[in-house]
Image (cartoon, rainbow, N blue to C red):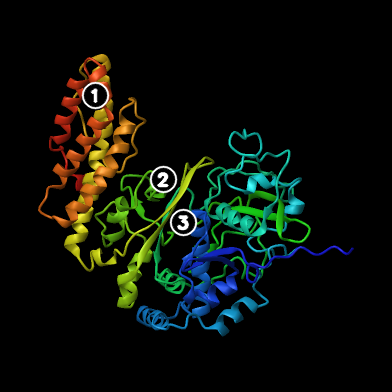
Amino acid sequence: MPCVPARFSTADDPWIDVRCGTTYRQVGLRELFLVAHTIDDLAIPIAPSASGLLRIAAAITARITGLDNPTLSADQWNTHRWDLLSSPEGFNPAAVNAYFDNKAHYFEVFDPVRPWLQDPLLASQCKSPSGINKLVFGRPAGNNLAWLSPHHDLDPAPVPTAQALQHLLIHHYYGASGGGTPRTVGRRAPRHLGGRSGPLRSTVSFHPLGRTLYETLLAQIPKLTGEQTEPDLCPWEDPAPPTPDTPPTPVTWPGRILTGRSQHALLLVPGHDGSHVSDVYLTWATERPPLPTTDPYLVIHTKRNAKPELRRYPRRADADKAWWRELDALLLAPDEHRAFRRPQIFDTLNDLPDPVRTSLRVRVHGFDQDGKVNNRRWYTAITPPILAWAQEHDPERAERIAECVATAEHHAGRLTYLADQAWKDTVNGPGRPAQSRTVGKPEKKSTSPWAAPARAAYWPLAEHAFWRLLDQPDLSARRAFATAAEQALRTATAGDRVRLRHAARAIAAAVAELHRPPRTRPEQDRR
């Protein structure tokens, strides 16, 4: 029997989960755009995969609509997008088919010369593949112990190609630092490339979410800022295959900035017919450091006293953080005096048609990781329509939200410190006076058994207080969150206050400190 060549097209084979009403199915990239106006939303179960795919889809959306034209003025660009959003017919089918039928674009996953988002040189430059378990996030690989997983390297289980592609995106955008499988380029075989983690590693992204996928894709195209003289190409549009010796390509708009900043090289090894992936090569893509740029979906913090290369950094993902605690960073207009800036994509949303803008929600995609190799948890959330609260439309509501979020974070820090201090006073006698923590700085590891349960009890109470404060602007935010912190501390220590001799006195002292006005205002702490 002749061997069936392995093939899988990201353009025409189904691999992207979508939702239409209560119906779920998989589509390829071509169908995704042809019927985007009938699709409610993506339904990819892995948040970092969805985050990467949204960036790829945004770049393709710009291509097929002409919104990637750098010669358009800001008014022309806004008018063109306005006209597209006002059309109920979706994307132009001829433009969609022309893009995916273009022979210069490579969408075949197992193409021997130009596999999609892969480097075919790895088969000859790596002595052996990395193992399929190395591709799939959540599987133990190498010497890691398989405590809670049936997978291990002695019996690797193939992965459906549709699922493998989603994990491929995670490595490109959120991959770990380090060299991976050794790769020999000429006579060079560097093993350690410190700092080469994925461009989105340990970050949280904020994506506009429309009533249909068509609105979502058009709303999330970033505007060109500045000038552009270099040609802009996505990796699958580049006529030259990737090589580790190629100098860094300028981060052009929108293709390179959204799809062309990976620090990892992968090559999927197919099963007999392409329906499954049996192995993978995973290693470094380049020895050169990445060029600086700003992802348009990230909140950017500025630390003025840091070294220039460390002054600006994205907000880290935190799986324990509820979405309402991000509202200040999404609603406040850019201000050079603030220590953070909302995602650049939010600067374009005020120019949308009113029916789109007023119904627009925000999808949150985060991957809680450390900066190198350890992964904690990914998460996602969807906000209600919030653009009406933006500073451009309702400055009083935006400032009130910022005040409440800052005060809630401030009292969370005070609660952690005072819970630790009360425990010390209970065990060792009275300690030093309580101090407040500067909001925005990472909390030190707790030294008491009270801090974690107190924080767990505090945040639901703080969220209830937050929404009540928005409806009643005359209430004191400091007093409301101090009361929430007091209730949380008393709940977390209820049993120990009876069991331990000095606990009641220590908790009473901590409660008094919680209600004492801080030495600095919360909004100052965030600057």
In the image, what residue occupies the spot 17% across and 52% down? 469
Q: Vertical placement of 446 versus 305: above or below?
A: above
- Quadrant for residue 30, please give it: bottom right
Q: Secondary structure at mark 2?
A: loop
Q: Are dots 1 and 3 in contact, CB under 8 Å? A: no
Query: Residue 429, image x and y in percent?
Result: 22, 15
- Quadrant for residue 269, please give it: bottom right
Q: Amino acid at mark 3?
A: Pro
Q: Amino acid at mark 1?
A: Ala
* Residue 344 can be seen in this image: yes
Which residue is at the far front?
A: 22
In the image, what residue occupies the spot 52% across and 59% down? 44
Query: Residue 258, image x and y in percent?
Result: 50, 63
Q: Which residue is the site of mark 3?
A: 292
Q: Nearer the viewer, residue 369 or 274?
A: 274
Which residue is at the far right?
A: 1
Q: Vertical placement of 460 versus 237: above or below?
A: above
Q: Vertical placement of 81 versus 199: above or below?
A: below
Q: Which residue is the site of mark 1?
A: 422
Instruction: Tell me the mark number nearer the camera, choosing from 3 and 2.
Output: 2
Cα–Cα gap, marks 2 and 1 = 27 Å
Q: Which residue is the site of mark 2?
A: 319
Q: Amino acid at mark 2?
A: Ala
Query: Residue 217, image x and y in percent?
Result: 46, 71
In the image, what residue occupies the spot 33% across and 51% down? 302
